[in-house]
Amino acid sequence: MKTATLLALLLVSIPSIATNGDSPDSITYDVVAVDGKLYLEVEPEAQRLEVGDQAVSGDRLRTGSSTTAAIGIPTHTTIFRLEAKTSCTLAHDRPGVLLHVEKGRIRAMFGAFTGSDPRLVTTPSAVLAVRGTEYGLRVKKNGDTKIVVFEGVVEVSDPAGENPPIRVEAGQQSRIKRGRPVGAPVAHRLTPHDWDQGRSAPPPGMNGSGSSPGSRTGTSGSSGAGSSGKGSGSKRRGG
């Protein structure tokens, strides 16, 4: 099953559960798709994860080259699609943070949510807050960040909160340099499918793959992390 189909089904089927009172260390992440190699960084050596395995807050994940994977958080109606050579930490040390992306590319999908807790994604140069939306995120090795919003609105601020947050809406993108204020949003014409294919601009004469800016049409046609079919139950250590 293609990742896009799997993610769409999961987003529709997972319930909107209020998480008041949940502590960050109680969040469980389900591995819902893997095409390639997804690693859980533990000592003495990294442990490979497959579909059906789980990770928890504080774990660090890494994808191999030519890899796409997807992890879901049912309690927060959230799915992250991780692309090749991406490193991230789950539920980082700041309250409300579900994912800290150290480097690499992800596509974040947030369904409707009835809880009052924030759903945040952080990078070395930015903090991104949403209610329900979809966006692509790229983090360079130096910590610089690019966000491309496909649906909804993302409020972007610097990690120290020294400058007013910037709203980046569907059809807009913004670049954030480490240690600098958030860049003013500018228009883009990418679709989720374009993003999944690694494009930074649509093909000449086309609006991405033919979809309108901010639409989810490209999602249903995106390829990438398909279910590996190797799920063998949770490998997550006890607790």
Image: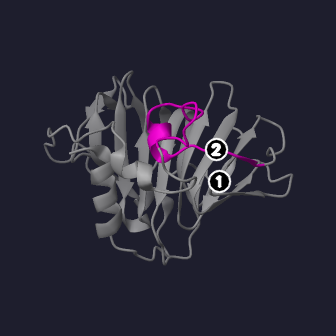
Mark 2 residue type: Ile
Q: Position of residue 51 (x, y in %)?
A: 22, 43
User: Residue 54: x, y in percent?
Assistant: 29, 48
Q: Which residue is mark 2?
A: 147
Within 10 Å of the Cα at label 2, are there few (<14), some (14-19), or many (20+) other Cα atoms? many
Q: Residue at x 76, y 49 (%)?
A: 185
Question: Which secondary structure, mark 1?
Answer: strand
Instruction: Categorize mark 1 by other alpha carbons within 10 Å: few (<14), some (14-19), many (20+).
Output: many
Residue 181 in percent (x, y) is at 84, 44
Which quarter of the figure is the N terminus placed in?
top left
When the figure is inspected, residue 106 is found, relative to residue 14, above or below; the finding is above
CB atoms at circles 2 and 1 under 8 Å apart?
Answer: yes
- Identify the mark at residue 139; answer none if there is no mark: none
For badge 1, the amino acid type reads Leu
Secondary structure character of the magenta stretch overall: loop
The Cα atoms of the two marked residues, 2 and 1, are separated by 9 Å
Taking the spot 34% from the left edge, 23% from the top edge, the residue there is: 44
Q: Is residue 116 above or below residue 87?
A: below
Q: Nearer the viewer, residue 174 or 237?
A: 174
Q: Which residue is mark 1?
A: 128
